[in-house]
Amino acid sequence: MESLSDTKWDVVISGTGLQQSLLALALSRSGKNILHLDPNDYYGGSEAAFSLDEADEWAERHRSTDGPGCFVAAEAKRDADRLSSRGYSLALAPQIIHARSQLLSQLVSSKAFRQIEFLAVGSFYIYQPAADPSSSPSLSRIPSTREDVFSNEAIPAKAKRSLMKFLKFVLDYTSEPQAEVWKPLAEAPLTVLLANHFKLDSNLQSYIITLTLSHDGKITVEAGLATIHRHLTSMGVFGAGFAAVYPKWGGLAEIAQVGCRAAAVGGAVYMLGTGVKKVDVSSGELLLAITLTNNMVVSSKYLTQNSDGTADDELSLSRLIAVVNSTLPQFFEITVEGAPSPAVGVVAFPPGTALDAGGTVSDFPVYGMIHSSDTSECPPGQCVVYLSTVAGAQSKQYLGKALASLLAVSADGAESATPLYQLYYEQKVGPPAVHVEKNVVSFRGAAPGLTFDDSLLELVRRAWENVSDSAIESSVAYMQFDDREQAEDDDYET
């Protein structure tokens, strides 16, 4: 058997994040010699999922407030000593995937979906602080269908008519009559269209903005309409009562793992704990000489890797993952007859909402995603709360107060939940991009929104087109494969 340095590789892929893993999936039937590396000792990159011990180690490596990479200021805290570390799978990228997402279509056409279990995402809520000292905070469910609107007793009749007018508009927003209304305002904040054209008050505006899951709450008209259209048209596609799904066992980390498994079955070689140190063009051949971090030199036609560059429009987010000692059943109610039990609930604290009894408010939304134990991210009897907001001097404090307020929302007077484990960190994010220079393809990280962004898929396809060249037969369609006669889930780590 040839050694790694003696093999002429067709493609070396550095990193096992989602983009690189989807590229590996796309190349898994190509017959190419593929070497897939990761400088980390785990799969998934910025979309990884960790046990508690792994999360502790990861936090220690990223505790610096000005370190390299996209993760900084990490801090782990255990409020209970007797936790079984391996009973958890905490996700760095707990994104939900809408039913109309092209990602799901590609997972189906590539047959990768057979290795992924998807769970229903339930209702979206607005957190409502207590109106006075004698009352309790509550959750207001955001209506997404005609039936939801008219059954919502909290919305006045006149406001319901305005909200229905907007929802009907969104469903047909690309038609010529509707486009004439919004296109002159395409780059304006969505709230301008909601207030001026549809006469929605600030309360209903917060409902609509929450459906977009915009980090800063300042999404444009064009982007907002597209996002809400995807949400509304996804409702009921896979079953009654839900518009999005979530992959079991750690979200996007599981999809990255599936992509790597497919490539391994196709013959790719995997090496963890090994990255790329230096890249040179070999003399006399159109090959790259790639020096690995273990000082081994390998030759390859193409290299794909992560870019170390930053973007001018990069944003920083504060994120908090908390394991709590309650199932928080109020977030997982079945609201439509025949609907599956949801495993994920979404809640928002709109800008200006009191995060605690003291009236603390943030200029940016705080979003929470609550995952039940059905996701296999925690043991039965517990749940995982993922909180995020735009980073700032007080964002860590805001997330802590939002967590406390969420846990205080009790069902049937039950005792409030308490956190057993918390992982705080900050993440630099920017719009995903790909850069091609000769035979080196560089991905700039993926923006970790709360919903999967299909624009990332086009970047993966561009990378595939650059590294596939004539060795890929024209009859092989992108991400469209037949079932393997014997598909195995063998261990693919070397």
Image: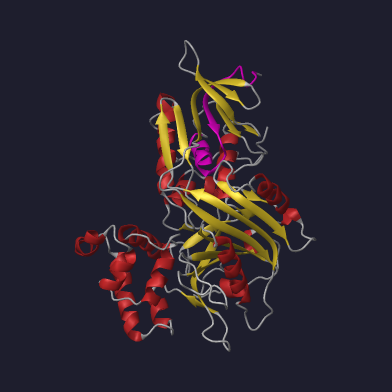
Point out the residue furthest to the bottom here.
134
Determine the residue located farthest toward the top in the rendered image: 284
Segment colored magenta: 2-27
Instruction: Locate the N terminus and report the quarter of the image it occupies.
Output: top right
14, above or below 145, in the image: above
What residue is shown at x 57% (from left), y 78% (from top)?
357
Furthest residue to the right? 82
x, y (%) of residue 159? 34, 81
Q: Nearer the viewer, residue 478 or 305?
A: 305
The answer to which image quadrant residue 36 occupies is top right
Residue at image point 45% right, 66% down: 363
Judge left or right: residue 201 versus residue 440.
Answer: left
Q: Quadrant of residue 256?
A: top right
Q: Nearer the viewer, residue 210 or 300?
A: 210
Location of residue 154 by image quarter: bottom left
Name the residue rendered at 62%, 74% in the picture: 329
Residue 289: say if magenta: no
> How many circles with numbers are drawn on the protein?
0
Say if residue 16 shows up in the picture. Answer: yes
Residue 28 vertical placement versus 60 (above, below): above
Q: x, y (%) of residue 9?
A: 54, 23
Q: Is residue 62 left or right of residue 452?
A: right
Q: Is residue 343 visible?
A: no
> 49 or 60, which lies in front?
60
Residue extending furthest front? 393
Horizontal side, residue 272 vs residue 288: left or right: right
Q: Position of residue 158 (x, y in %)?
A: 32, 84
**Residue visible at 42% across and 47% down in the picture:** 431
Residue 21 included in the magenta stretch of the image: yes
| Quarter the C terminus occupies | top right
Give the answer, above or below, for where 483 lies relative to 3. below
Q: Position of residue 147 (x, y in %)?
A: 40, 77
